[in-house]
Image (spheres, grey):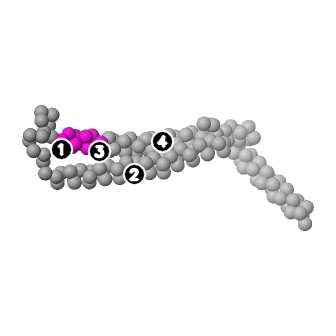
Amino acid sequence: MPHSGKDFGVDLYALEQVAKSDLPTLSGAYRDAATKAESAHGGVRGLPPEPPELTGDKGSVFSKYGEAHNAVIDLLRRTRTNLDETAQALQEARDDYAERDRARLDAEFLAVSHELADDADDLVAARRHIAGLIRNIDRCLEILKE
């Protein structure tokens, strides 16, 4: 990832899109899957238990299904939580990168401004002078267009 400029801004935007849109969308899919899986288990609970002679020494099919079902729901929930936490961490990293870039630009501006003038009043006067020159150039361009 570049450290400044337009490409850096594009990368920050991409990070923000992943953190605010892509990961939350995926997280929502896992939430929906967990909700649907929970409701599917309700249908199994309504079935009559199997006869004891069919359960054997390994336990009932219903209890094994319940264990597997709970494991799947737990996995879906943990994945959703991980996606949410990843999105949060990615947004924080994006914000940190952006803040560091702003601080770097501020430091560059201050360094350049001190090279232009040691006194703040001199810098303000220079900015006004440059603004006046730009206005004159704009007027000249307008005259040339006519």
Residues at circles 1 and 2 in contact by the CB criterion of under 8 Å: no
**Front of the two marks 4 and 1:** 1
Mark 2 or 3 closer to N-term? 2
Element type at mark 4: helix
Q: Mark 3 is on which residue type?
A: Ile
Q: Mark 2 is on which residue type?
A: Gly
**Front of the two marks 2 and 4:** 2
Instruction: Give residue 107's quadrant in the image.
Output: top right
Bounds of the magenta span? 61-74
Mark 2–mark 3 distance (CA, rounded to whole Å): 14 Å
Position of residue 146 relative to residue 70, above or below, is: below
The local crowd at label 4, few if under 14, some if 14 to 19, many if 20 or more residues have their Cα within 10 Å, is some
**Front of the two marks 2 and 3:** 3
Instruction: Give residue 67's quadrant in the image.
Output: top left
Element type at mark 2: helix
- Residue displayed at 74% across by 41% down: 117
Mark 1–mark 2 distance (CA, rounded to whole Å): 29 Å
Dot 3 corresponds to which residue?
73
Dot 1 corresponds to which residue?
62
Instruction: Give residue 115's quadrant in the image.
Output: top right
Mark 4–mark 1 distance (CA, rounded to whole Å): 41 Å
Dot 2 corresponds to which residue?
28
Residue 67 part of the magenta-drawn span: yes
Mark 4 or 1 closer to N-term? 1
Q: Mark 1 is on which residue type?
A: Phe
List x then y, in percent, for residue 97. 55, 40
Mark 2–mark 4 distance (CA, rounded to whole Å): 17 Å
Element type at mark 3: helix
Mark 2 or 4 closer to N-term? 2
